[in-house]
Amino acid sequence: DTEVTQTPKHLVMGMTNKKSLKCEQHMGHRAMYWYKQKAKKPPELMFVYSYEKLSINESVPSRFSPECPNSSLLNLHLHALQPEDSALYLCASSQGDRSYGYTFGSGTRLTVV
Amino acid sequence: AQSVTQPDIHITVSEGASLELRCNYSYGATPYLFWYVQSPGQGLQLLLKYFSGDTLVQGIKGFEAEFKRSQSSFNLRKPSVHWSDAAEYFCAVGTNTDKLIFGTGTRLQVFP
């Protein structure tokens, strides 16, 4: 298995809702990442988990809450989002050695109404 | 500061023509360089990477890139473009802090 699987593919939520994005990989990668991508922009790093521990938080608002239950799973819990949070959310994983690059999932298209 | 510059926002080529996408980086140490491709609404797919050895690297889908340290460049090339190559292309540098820094991207349009 050489894929990163993200669910759901599309999500529409209201500003008072609570929802979660899920990401799964079975490549034995030790690092997992959340990126946010706005239209016509490059991905922006949000969080990095290394060996299931949060190692980087790029000053992301607390309405985004990451969780890494085990080495294969990564969640992003969403609460009280704003319309400007609408974007493509990408999950990625890596072996942790930067020479290998990242493997990206196909993303969750989030719309906040 | 670490950065990646892709000077061309949008490039249009005819199918069958050759292609070169430019990428310049700024990084103090030995750079780990990548090219990714993204189709609309999709994730990013790794085309190729460089971190040492031969400065001309081969990737998937017939792409290649050449690392030129003297010019701080890592340009992507393809000898003959196919209509299916139309997509957004991102150059990126891997840092020693587990971050991947992306350029702003180049949108490739292919005319039949």
Image (tube, grey):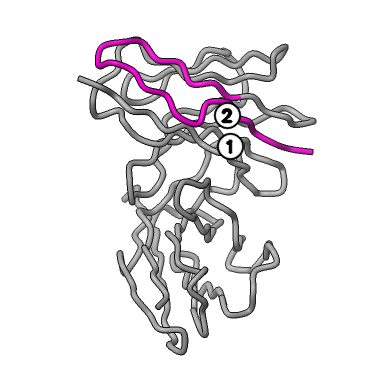
Distance, label 1 to label 2, CA atoms, is 6 Å
Query: Within 10 Å of the Cα at label 1, are there few (<14), some (14-19), or many (20+) other Cα atoms?
Result: many
Q: Chain of mark 1?
A: B
For this rendering, which residue is in front, B13 or B58? B13
Q: Position of residue A85 (x, y in %)?
A: 51, 69
- Residue position for label 1: B103
Q: Is residue A81 above or below residue B62?
A: below
> If you read the primary sequence from the N terminus, does the residue marked by circle 1 or circle 2 appear first?
2
The reply, left or right, for residue B31 in relation to residue A87 is: right
Residue range in magenta is B1-23
The reply, left or right, for residue B69 in relation to residue B41 is: right
Q: Chain of mark 2?
A: B
For this rendering, which residue is in front, A50 or A14? A14
> Does the magenta portion include B16?
yes
Q: Secondary structure at mark 2?
A: loop
For this rendering, which residue is in front, B15 or A106? B15
The numbered dot on residue B6 is 2
Quarter assignment of residue B61: top left
